[in-house]
Structures are given as structure tokens and as C-alpha cells.
């Protein structure tokens, strides 16, 4: 039974430009983008402490959220094993796009693998929601509004692209919010605890999916945990005895 409700008819009426715009917007929730955002926050945060009180700690926590959210998505996708909408893996580049850009366009607007729940929606909710809680810019309510807007835009883009049904992104947002709240309660924003949780989820994802991406997620989380713990021990060893 299809999870869509008139989705094909609606998408067929959308102009080509809507698909192109959705392909760009959806990158805000892609793994590469959120990891680059973490790196950028660390670089700029160390220069401007008005962004975050502790760049290393907050970036490590956000990194753990991003990787953990990806791993949780992998586990859930393989548990439900529900397909994406028909045609999710193919796209026809618009006539105005030069042939040189066809491959890039197709990579932006298509998706493969299982479709439920939406990984972009889940990861975006957890990552940007976490950012709204740890950053210092503006006030918290305004940060939450921005995070919610980005999440809604990314979730909508997945439906517009035809790579997810509406229920996929709705459930992705709900699970992402639950994952964020659970992570905050379990780890209390401690990077070591967050990275440990991400490593456990990565191990589950690799055991479930067994693919290269889940292996990379496990490796990234484990490496992050190792580096963080080693750094903490090194700093504790080098601290003044009176401060230990």
C-alpha cells in the first residue's frame, strides 16, 4: 500500500525551477553540509566567542548529533525497509541546464535506498535544533524559529523532489526531535557521552545495514570519541596539580 496521498499528481504540476530550488535547499540537511557547518563553527567560534562559549565542546556535541542521527536513520530504514516513491532515483534535467551540469543536477534531486523515515528530516531536526540550544547568537526563541524554518524547508524539499512521501518527513522530524531530547537528557551535552552514544548507534547501523556509509559513520564517531577522550586526559595531565 502506498504511503502517498496524491503526491504524484501534485509533483507533476510543479515547474522545473521548483525542483531545482528544492535540490539546493535539501543540501542544508545533507551530511556533507552539516559536517562542513560544524567545522566552520569551530573556526569562527574560536575567533568570536559571541557565537559559542566553548567551540570545541559545542562542535563535538553537534558532530555527535549529526553522526548519531545518520546512524539512527540507517537502523530505522533497514528495520522498516519501505521503498521510496516511484522515480526517486531518476531525474530529467531541465532544458535550460547545460549538459555539463546534468550529472550534478541528478545528484542533487535524486535519492536511492529505503525511504522511511526521511534521514534529511531526522538529521536536520536534531542538528539544527541542537545548534539552537548551544549557540549564543540572538536569543534562544529566535534560534529555535530559525532551526524550525530550516527543518521545515528541508523536509518540504524532500517531498517536492519526489524522493520521500509526506509521512516519511513527518516521522523523520518527530524522531529527530525525540533523538535530540533523548541525547540531551542522556549526555547532558557532554561531548564524551554524546560521542559514545553516537558510536553505539554507529555500531548498530553497521550491524544492520553493513554498507560503506554506516561503516564510515561508525568510524567517524569512534575516532571522535577517541580524540576527545585523549585530549581530555592530556589536558588533565598537564594541568596545575592544584587544579586537578
Image (spheres, rainbow, N blue to C red):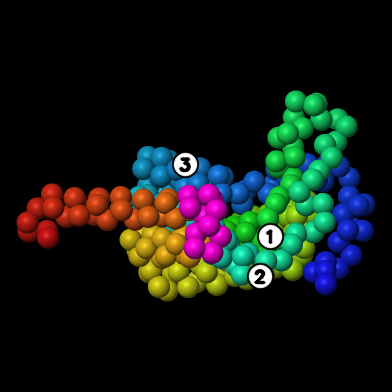
Mark 1 is surrounded, within 10 Å at the Cα level, by few (under 14), some (14 to 19) or many (20 or more) other residues, namely: many
Identify which residue is drawn at 52% across, 69% down: 179
Q: Nearer the viewer, mark 3 or mark 1?
A: 1
Question: What main secondary structure does the magenta stretch of the protein show?
Answer: helix
* Quarter where residue 153 is shown: bottom right
Residue in the foreground of this view, choosing between 62 and 227: 227
Say which label, 3 or 1, has the lower sequence index.
3
Residue 134, magenta (yes or no): no
Say which label, 1 or 2, has the lower sequence index.
2
Tags 1 and 2 in contact by the CB under 8 Å rule? yes
Q: How many numbered marks have been drawn onto this rendered protein structure?
A: 3
Identify which residue is drawn at 75% across, 25% down: 100
Mark 3 is surrounded, within 10 Å at the Cα level, by few (under 14), some (14 to 19) or many (20 or more) other residues, namely: few
The residue that mark 1 highlights is 114
- CA distance for labels 3 and 2: 35 Å
Identify which residue is drawn at 49% across, 63% down: 207
- CA distance for labels 3 and 1: 31 Å
Identify which residue is drawn at 88% across, 32% down: 95
Q: Nearer the viewer, mark 3 or mark 2?
A: 2
Which portion, as a residue range, is magenta?
206-216
Say which label, 3 or 2, has the lower sequence index.
3
Image disc number at residue 40: 3
Amino acid at each position: 500500500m502506498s504511503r502517498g496521498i496524491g503526491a504524484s499528481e501534485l509533483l507533476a504540476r510543479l515547474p522545473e525551477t521548483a525542483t531545482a530550488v528544492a535540490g539546493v535547499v535539501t543540501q542544508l540537511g545533507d551530511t556533507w553540509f552539516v559536517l562542513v557547518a560544524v567545522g566552520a563553527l569551530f573556526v569562527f567560534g574560536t575567533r568570536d566567542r559571541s557565537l559559542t562559549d566553548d567551540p570545541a565542546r559545542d562542535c563535538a556535541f553537534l558532530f555527535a548529533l549529526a553522526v548519531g542521527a545518520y546512524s539512527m536513520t540507517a537502523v530505522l530504514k533497514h528495520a522498516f525497509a519501505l521503498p521510496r516513491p516511484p522515480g526517486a532515483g531518476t531525474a530529467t534535467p531541465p532544458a535550460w541546464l547545460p549538459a555539463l551540469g546534468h550529472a550534478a543536477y541528478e545528484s542533487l534531486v535524486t535519492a536511492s535506498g529505503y525511504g522511511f523515515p526521511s534521514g534529511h528530516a531526522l538529521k536536520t531536526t536534531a542538528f539544527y535544533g541542537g545548534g539552537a540550544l548551544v549557540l549564543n547568537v540572538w536569543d534562544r526563541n529566535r534560534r529555535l524559529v530559525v532551526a524550525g524554518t530550516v527543518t521545515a524547508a528541508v523536509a518540504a524539499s524532500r517531498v517536492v523532489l519526489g524522493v520521500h512521501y509526506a509521512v516519511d518527513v513527518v516521522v523523520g522530524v518527530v524522531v529527530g526531535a525525540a533523538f535530540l531530547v533523548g541525547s540531551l537528557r542522556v549526555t547532558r551535552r557532554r561531548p564524551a557521552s554524546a560521542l559514545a552514544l553516537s558510536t553505539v548507534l554507529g555500531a548498530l547501523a553497521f550491524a544492520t545495514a553493513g554498507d560503506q556509509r554506516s561503516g564510515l559513520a561508525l568510524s567517524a564517531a569512534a575516532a571522535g570519541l577517541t580524540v576527545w577522550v585523549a585530549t581530555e586526559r592530556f589536558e588533565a595531565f598537564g594541568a596545575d596539580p592544584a587544579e586537578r
